[in-house]
Image: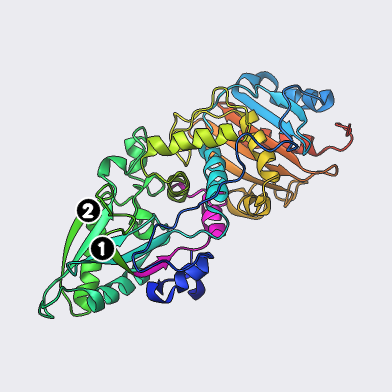
């Protein structure tokens, strides 16, 4: 997660950070940088292919039925082509726990609502009384290097009129209440692991070291305070809830500095290629313009419905798939992949995925087979669940494939057979 110098922070007065995001410089009292447009309007524009409801390729249907065999009850499989034909479908309407295939939804919404140039931003503000405020958007790569920069800026910018130079710098940290740090049904054991770290706006190293950081605001105060003292200053911290008037939008403060994250490609790749739970959760919240997860998942359901996707049985509970209360169908995921293939940012979406035999969570799967380098997708794994959904290259064009197993033996082997059968030419002649 290294960042180039060109992607890092800038002084707000120069407007350079905003130039990097493709936005115009704000007035002195800055406004929140959120997306102003969404593609497409609901319902989807006429002419875009939509997933059909009837299977149209008996030959492939028979082959996939033979692959899952007596374990069919544990599987949901859907395969579609670019025209929207449902080539094969096994239990495609049955809601299943999707594991990290849930991230395909979060990243699609984020790319659509925020755009490919969006960056998560950490900001330093000065209030009228001379105190400082730090706000964040959950940058997953915020680290000690950036903390040193904030310490230096705080020492150079803090203090009210007439205060002696030795007076402590007063810094407010704007954060979500602790009851929002985790989705409510995440298992307590998962919350202790790095992959289940708390979701906060100001997150050093994604709130994880070897394990999850249990209290991110305490850690931030400790490390930032150490750095300020190392640079010769003193500091007094307070934590302000994000719901406080003006806490996030800067309506009562002057913007001093912005620290942008890596670009959207890097964020999407963290979520999809590396299956980073923290990043997926942050993207869902930012794209829905709410860090209240109930509101965020409601916005996600509305967005999915607006795309004309099959919504029967679909339940969005979190942004990463760690919750076992999520329910997706293989038809929903195949239809989402088809929909995003028609999106203006289709290339960005597909480029964020793992590649069979080569990259990310698929790098060790299907090497040396016909799938090597020819399948881009998202994996999902939690206890008893295995899922893979993505875009398969075939001699007859792309296929949009989703396979979810809740139970079943040797799921990776079965999924490999499903994908290879879907590559066989001549089974599904074009109409």
**Boundaries of the magenta span:** 256-277
Residue that extends furthest to the front in the rendered view of this protein: 27
Q: Viewer-proximal residue, 37 or 278?
A: 37
Neighbourhood count class around disc 2 (C-alpha, 10 Å): few under 14, some 14–19, many 20 upward: some
Circle number at residue 184: none
Q: Viewer-proximal residue, 159 or 403?
A: 159
Determine whether the residue tagged by mark 1 lies in a helix, strand or loop: strand
Residues at discs 2 and 1 in contact (Cβ within 8 Å): yes
Answer with the quarter of the image where residue 427 lies.
Answer: top right
The C terminus appears in which quarter of the rendering? top right
Residue drawn at 46 percent across, 41 percent down = 319
**Residue 50 visible, this orientation:** yes
Give how far across and how far down residue 21 sits, in percent.
Answer: 51, 65
**Residue 410 visible, this orientation:** no
Determine whether the residue tagged by mark 2 lies in a helix, strand or loop: strand
Give how far across and how far down residue 180 sits, in percent.
Answer: 31, 41
Q: Which residue is mark 1?
A: 133
Q: Relative to residue 231, is residue 351 depicted above or below? A: above
Q: Viewer-proximal residue, 354 or 154?
A: 154
In this image, 26 relative to 333: left or right? Answer: left
Neighbourhood count class around disc 1 (C-alpha, 10 Å): few under 14, some 14–19, many 20 upward: many
Circle number at residue 240: 2
Which sits earlier in the primary sequence, circle 2 or circle 1? 1
Give how far across and how far down residue 160 sits, in percent.
Answer: 15, 73
Q: Viewer-proximal residue, 237 or 33?
A: 33
Instruction: Compute the Cα span from label 2 to label 1.
Output: 9 Å
Give how far across and how far down residue 157 sits, in percent.
Answer: 25, 76
Indicate whether residue 218 is drawn in magenta. no
Residue drawn at 39 percent across, 55 percent down = 137
In this image, 294 relative to 67: left or right? Answer: left
Residue drawn at 67 percent across, 18 percent down = 70
């Amino acid at each position: 997660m290294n960042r180039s110098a060109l992607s890092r922070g800038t002084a707000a007065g120069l407007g350079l950070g905003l130039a990097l995001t493709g936005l115009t410089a704000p007035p002195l009292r800055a406004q929140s940088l959120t997306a102003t447009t969404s593609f497409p309007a609901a319902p989807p524009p006429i002419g875009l292919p939509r997933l059909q409801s009837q299977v149209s390729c008996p030959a492939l249907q028979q082959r996939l039925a033979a692959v899952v065999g007596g374990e069919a009850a544990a599987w949901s499989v859907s395969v579609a082509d670019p025209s929207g034909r449902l080539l094969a479908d096994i239990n495609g309407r049955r809601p299943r726990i999707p594991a990290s295939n849930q991230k395909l939804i979060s990243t699609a919404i984020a790319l659509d609502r925020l755009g490919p140039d969006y960056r998560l931003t950490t900001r330093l503000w000065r209030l009228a009384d001379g105190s400082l405020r730090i706000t964040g958007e959950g940058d997953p790569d915020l680290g000690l290097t950036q903390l040193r920069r904030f310490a230096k800026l705080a020492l150079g910018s803090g203090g009210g009129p007439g205060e002696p130079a030795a007076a402590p710098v007063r810094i407010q940290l704007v954060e979500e209440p602790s009851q929002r740090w985790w989705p409510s049904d995440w298992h307590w054991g998962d919350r202790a692991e790095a992959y289940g770290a708390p979701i906060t706006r100001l997150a050093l190293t994604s709130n994880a070291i070897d394990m999850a950081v249990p209290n991110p605001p305490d850690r931030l105060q400790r490390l930032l305070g150490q750095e300020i003292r190392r640079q010769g200053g003193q500091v007094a911290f307070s934590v302000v809830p994000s719901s406080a008037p003006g806490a996030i939008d800067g309506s009562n403060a002057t913007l001093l500095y912005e620290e942008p994250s890596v670009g959207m490609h890097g964020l999407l790749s963290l979520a999809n290629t590396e299956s980073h739970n923290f990043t997926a959760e942050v993207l869902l919240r930012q794209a829905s313009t709410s860090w209240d997860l109930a509101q965020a998942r409601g916005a996600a359901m509305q967005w999915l419905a607006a795309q004309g996707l099959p919504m029967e049985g679909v339940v969005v509970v979190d942004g990463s798939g760690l919750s076992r209360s999520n329910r997706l169908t293989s038809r929903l995921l195949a239809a989402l992949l088809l929909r995003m293939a028609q999106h203006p940012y289709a290339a960005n979406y597909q480029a964020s995925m793992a590649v069979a035999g080569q990259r990310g969570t698929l790098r060790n799967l299907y090497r040396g087979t016909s799938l090597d380098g020819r399948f881009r997708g998202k994996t999902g794994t939690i206890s008893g669940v295995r899922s893979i959904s993505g875009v398969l290259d075939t001699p007859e064009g792309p296929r949009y494939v989703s396979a979810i197993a809740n139970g079943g033996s040797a799921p990776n082997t079965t999924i490999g057979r499903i994908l290879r059968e879907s590559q066989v030419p001549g089974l599904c002649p074009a109409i």
